[in-house]
Image (tube, rainbow, N blue to C red):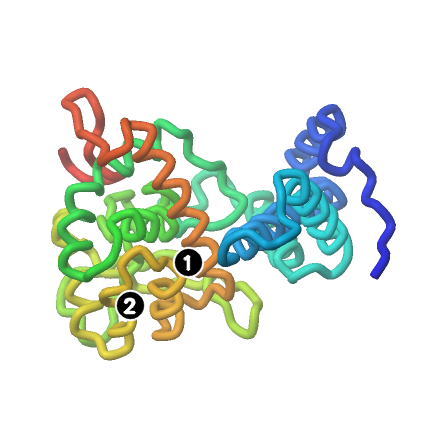
Amino acid sequence: MSSQPVAPTYYADFSGLEGLKKSVKADDPKAIRAAAQQFESLFTNMMLKSMRDAKLGQGLGDSQQSDLYQDMYDQQISLKMAQGKGIGLADMLVQQLTRNSAAKSAASPAASSSVPAAAPGNAAPSTGDRISFVKMLEPYAEKAAAQLGVSSDTLIAQAALETGWGQHVPGTANGASSLNLYGVKAGGSWNGDAVNSMTTEYSSGSAASVSQPFRRYSSVEQGVNDYVTLLQRSARYQKALGTGDDVGAFGGALAGGGYATDPIYIQKLQATVSSVKALRSSAGGGALKISSDQPTTVPGESS
């Protein structure tokens, strides 16, 4: 199969990239589409690389040179796919980013005082914010991981994915946090406090913002313990238990049990786990140590 090469400026022209960033900030539809396609190409290339790395040993013709050429070819394929229909990720991102832009234009600054659920298009928290979030959650995640038989990296990453690294925890109308880091809904069996908050749900691949009731806790520890109990006692999530470092198996079991409706929830969780591992390893290869000069609370929690 032959294909025309993708213009190098699509991914290597830094001046063009800077112009693209400015156009996205100005809500230029063409720029939003281009940015979404670049994201999809990077994501596709990451999947291809993961599949290549999963091979059993070296082949007869494998060498450093062949690996280099293979990486270059995979990048070319990823870019070419993203410029066409791709895997559909770019289309979903464009829909969400366009919807968020329209909502921000229509709403006044005081339109809503509740803490929204995490959604694409919001400003990403800084590295410092992410490290603070990991430090805050780490001791609870370590204990929960031992009870569930999974990696603490996975549990921290899931909380980060559900709340945008602690930036979008469901909250009350007056801004008080629910301390619900895992997005646990308040169903009919829940007898405690609850808060209503907007969240993104998917149906037949289409995303929609809906208001949902979420459980409200008195502490982060109570919330994590309740999450552990939910997974242990629910028949729907039994396959998630004991999955160890297998993020795909854990995320697949949650998605299969109805915990998440996002069609690419597993891929997002895997990418977030990689970020968590990088943050924790930057502290010396092990668990991050909480020091007295670092915040250990989430938004809305009284210290």
Q: Which mark is residue 199?
A: 1
Residue sitting at x 21%, y 41%: 138
Give the camera-side residue of 54 and 80: 54
Q: Split into 4 quadrants, where in the image is the N terminus?
A: bottom right
Residue sitting at x 19%, y 30%: 289
> How many marks do you count on the picture?
2
| Mark before the other along the chain sequence, 2 or 1 | 1
Disc 1 residue type? Thr
Question: Mark 1 packing: few (<14 Cα in 10 Å), some, or many (20+)?
Answer: some
| As drawn, 291 above or below 235 | above
| Residue 270 coordinates in the image, percent (x, y) | 43, 53
In the drawing, does residue 91 fall left or right of residue 230?
Answer: right
Residue sitting at x 51%, y 41%: 108
| Residue 16 coordinates in the image, percent (x, y) | 76, 29
Could you give the CA–CA distance between mark 2 and mark 1, rounded to whole angstroms?
23 Å
Would residue 258 be visible to someone looking at this image? yes
Q: Which mark is residue 123?
A: none
Disc 2 residue type? Ala
| As drawn, 259 above or below 282 | below
| Residue 14 coordinates in the image, percent (x, y) | 71, 26
Quadrant position of residue 255: bottom left
| Residue 208 coordinates in the image, percent (x, y) | 52, 63
Asked which secondary structure carries label 2, the reply is helix
Q: Split into 4 quadrants, where in the image is the C terminus?
A: top left
Asked which secondary structure carries label 1, the reply is strand
Q: Which mark is residue 240?
A: 2
In the drawing, does residue 299 fall left or right of residue 229?
Answer: right
Residue sitting at x 87%, y 50%: 4
Quadrant position of residue 88: bottom right
- The extreme front residue here reads 60
